[in-house]
Image (cartoon, helix red, strand yellow):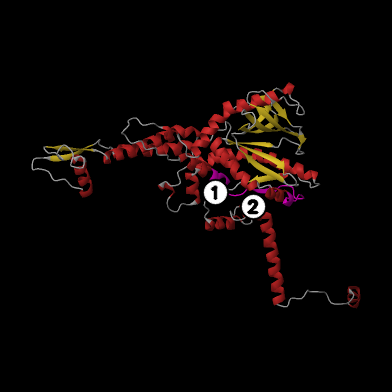
Amino acid sequence: MYKLTYPAEKYDESSLDKNIILTLIKQHRNKIVPQIRKNMRYYEGKHDILARKKSDRNAPNNKVVCNHAKDISDTATGYFMSSALTFRCVEKSMNLDKLTDAFDTGDVDETDHDNALDMARAGCAYEYVFVKAGTNNVISKNLDPRNAFIVYDDTIEENELFGVYYNYVKDDMTGKFKFIADVVTENLQYHMILFNDGSTLSSDEPKEHYMKELPFILYQNNKDCIGDYEQQITLIDAYNQITSDRVNDKEQFLNALLVLYGAKLADDGDDENGVSEVSKALKVLKDNGFLELPEDAKAEYLARTLDENGVETLRKALKEDIYTFSHVPNMSDENFAGNSSGVAMEYKLLALESITKTKERYYTKGLKKRIRLYCNYLGMLNISANPTAIIPTFKRGLPKNLLELSQIISNLRGFVSRKTLIQQLPFVEDPEAEMESVKEENKEAVEQQQGLFGYQPNTPPEGDGEEDESED
């Protein structure tokens, strides 16, 4: 992964060099963005096959897009982030409600899904945590990876210095192109206008953002920030090519030349209206669908022979390679048909589970920073929260056999805590709340039963115990 750096000895967050910021933006656009833009273009269905030119003026030029890129990224994202994240706390005295309420207000569930999709497409995702203007609510916003990056110092530690989010627009007054950039450091936030030619540079006075840490978060899809289908683009191009050529061959076959042996379709020349006799005969042939010929004459179409079996074998091989090398299974494949046990399904998804574990590991690193940022801000509101005691939990987007799962939970009862068992149920989002609900229901059931049978408390009879002993 290519990282943008700022000289450590020159860095002063209260006085950033705008020329260096402009240089970093240009480096990002020239060295990082082209591959991300290509990945995004393939997800949107804008493949290279659409730019193919005709080889022959009269030949058909169908351009068929088979969007395996979207299928791969959507499948991987759905498996990784189909359900909202849940959180548990290892510190019993700590209450998670304030933090989870802040997450709900900050729309983190939507941001998580957008981040996961960007990871699958672009290989990375960026999130900006900020306080919404005019409120005390913290918001998490997914940033377009084509317009956002984080800058590190040039030491071996590669410490995060600041994040940049920019847009490239045309100035209506001067006609020049400019960058409108928001630069955020550990404590300050800048709003800059940087012209592409460096002629005029302007910046507002920095403002404090009170997050106590750089509020930009990078989520990596893997160590090298490679998208889920990025290395299969050439295979996707080949699949599009063979499918398009197959359709072209079919069209050429339908438009094949009619060859007559020992006969003529019509006399040469035109009729009294100037219409060719041959054209009239072709129209009659097309409308009627048959041709009458002399005894020794024959007719046939001049066309290439289509090797359907060979083309179909190649098409299937390309499709199999696309999904094999991406490690994302083709869910429409016959291997996923029918009822499979949980273990059998896990074996089929072993490769997908492997890359999802990598996603989860890098995403957890970013989540820890998000939790710290939210806890920092809640601390300013006198709401204490220990970010190190909070552990996120991921759920896979996999169909569950609830009967099999209930049997497993029943067999483990007494060996595993109730909280852990409840966490295995996919329809339970908050195990703590579920345990409290069960406890309340059991208490109400006992009270109803006591009322039904007229239960009275067993109180000891009146009298002094010492007197009873003396009588004995």
Q: Position of residue 380 (x, y in %)?
A: 80, 43
Q: Which mark is residue 397?
A: 1
Q: Which residues are magenta?
A: 77-98
Residue bearing the label numbered 2: 420
Judge left or right: residue 323 versus residue 222. left
Q: Compare marks 2 and 1 and give the one earlier in the sequence.
A: 1
Q: Is residue 247 above or below residue 107?
A: above
Q: Residue furthest left?
A: 295
Tell me the distance, in whole angstroms, between the alpha carbons under discs 2 and 1: 19 Å
169 vs 162, nearest the viewer: 169
What amino acid does circle 1 point to? Gly
Count of numbered circles on the image: 2
Identify the residue shown where x is 68% and y is 45%: 391
Residue 65 within the magenta-colored segment of the rendering: no
Residue 91 within the magenta-colored segment of the rendering: yes
Q: Position of residue 404 (x, y in %)?
A: 53, 56
50 vs 70, nearest the viewer: 50
What amino acid does circle 2 point to? Thr
Quarter that holds the C terminus: bottom right
Quarter that holds the N terminus: top right
Q: Secondary structure at mark 2?
A: helix
Query: From where the camera sits, is residue 84 visible?
Result: yes
Q: Is residue 166 above or below residue 272?
A: above
* Mark 2 neighbour density, 10 Å: few (under 14) some (14–19) many (20 or more): few
Identify the residue shown where x is 52% and y is 44%: 74
